Amino acid sequence: MIQSMTGFGKHVVQLPSKKITIELKSLNSKNLDINARIPQFYREKELELRKMIADVLVRGKVDFGLYVEITGEETTTAVNQGVVKKYMQQLANITSGDDLKLLELALRMPDTMKTEKADIDETEYGAIKTAMKEALSEISKFRNEEGKVLEKDFIGRLSKLNNLLEEVKHMDPERLDTVRERLEKAVADLKVELDENRFEQELIYYLEKYDITEEKVRLANHLDYFESTLESKDSNGKKLGFIAQEIGREINTIGSKANYAPMQQLVVQMKDELEKIKEQMLNVL
């Protein structure tokens, strides 16, 4: 079953003094590209969190956000009292003013606030990892649902391609007869005597160049292979892309050999269906 690279997942965990939110959004990309927005306090855990994402999402452009809202009295920032008092003493020597005014001025000076570096609490980090797993589960479910939509579209277009191929097979004898008649008429218009045996040999050689038997067989095989790959356990967008290229190669060859307007019209329709498949293929994991 195929997966889409488009998805969204979110999970919120409430701790005694913090609300932590994990958000994941992914779009299509040739490789895995993770853009992380993490508070500085949690940067030391970024590589581990990235690995958790990579193990599950595998490929795509992923926006990852870790948001923390303080809901209790916890804070790591405090007033640097010694520095503030020093500033107030210096300001008092320069100008007169009450203590409240001097305090207001002092707090505008550098280094009046200090942030204490604390280690990440293991319980808190465990909650973050749990939230990450839940968000990854949600985005994976989203990707699976989108994949079902893509798979339905692919199967519909494969059916159209198979129907068009059957029309090509049905039309092929008529095409060869028409090409043969056209050549015979062109030679007859020349009004010259010909060696009938030699002419027949040359005609057979000429018609063999327009034979599309192998292309029809290969195209049918590629279409079957594409469908069986859709039904495989793992989503493999790159493999499906390679098969789509082979399908396109056979369709192009049939078009170049057709030399018959009604068949070339069918080829144009086949190319249109394949192009729509290729557009959707960009979003398959």
Image (tube, grey):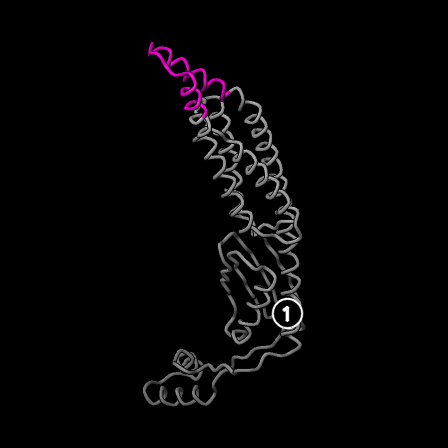
Task: Please report the residue visible at 64 percent of the width from the left and 78 percent of the height from the top.
Answer: 122
Principal secondary structure, stretch drawn in magenta: helix
Quadrant assignment, res 83: bottom left
Percent position (x, y) of residue 241? 52, 47
With respect to residue 8, does 249 lie above or below? Answer: above
Q: Quadrant of residue 48?
A: bottom right
At which x and y percent is residue 250? 49, 37
Q: 101 or 271, which is in the foreground? A: 271
Looking at the picture, how far across and down is residue 67, in whole percent? 56, 66
98 displayed left or right of 118: left
**Relative to 29, is 157 above or below?**
above
Give the secondary structure at mark 1: helix
- The residue drawn where x is 52% and y is 32% is 270
Q: Is residue 187 magenta?
A: yes
**Nearer to us in this view, 255 or 271:** 255
- The amino acid sitting under disc 1 is Lys
Answer yes or no: is residue 16 visible: yes
Of 258 and 5, nearer the camera is: 258
Q: Which residue is mark 1?
A: 129
Q: Residue at x 46, y 29 (%)?
A: 208
In magenta stretch: residue 58: no
Span of residues in magenta: 175-204
- Please rate how many residues cluster around mark 1, counting C-alpha atoms within 10 Å: few if below 14, some from 14 to 19, many from 20: some
**Whether residue 150 can be seen here:** no
Q: Count numbered badges in the picture.
A: 1
Residue in the image at 66% along x and 62% along y: 134
**Left or right position of 279 against 22:** left
Q: Position of residue 23 (x, y in %)?
A: 58, 60
User: Is 100 placed above or below 171 here?
Assistant: below
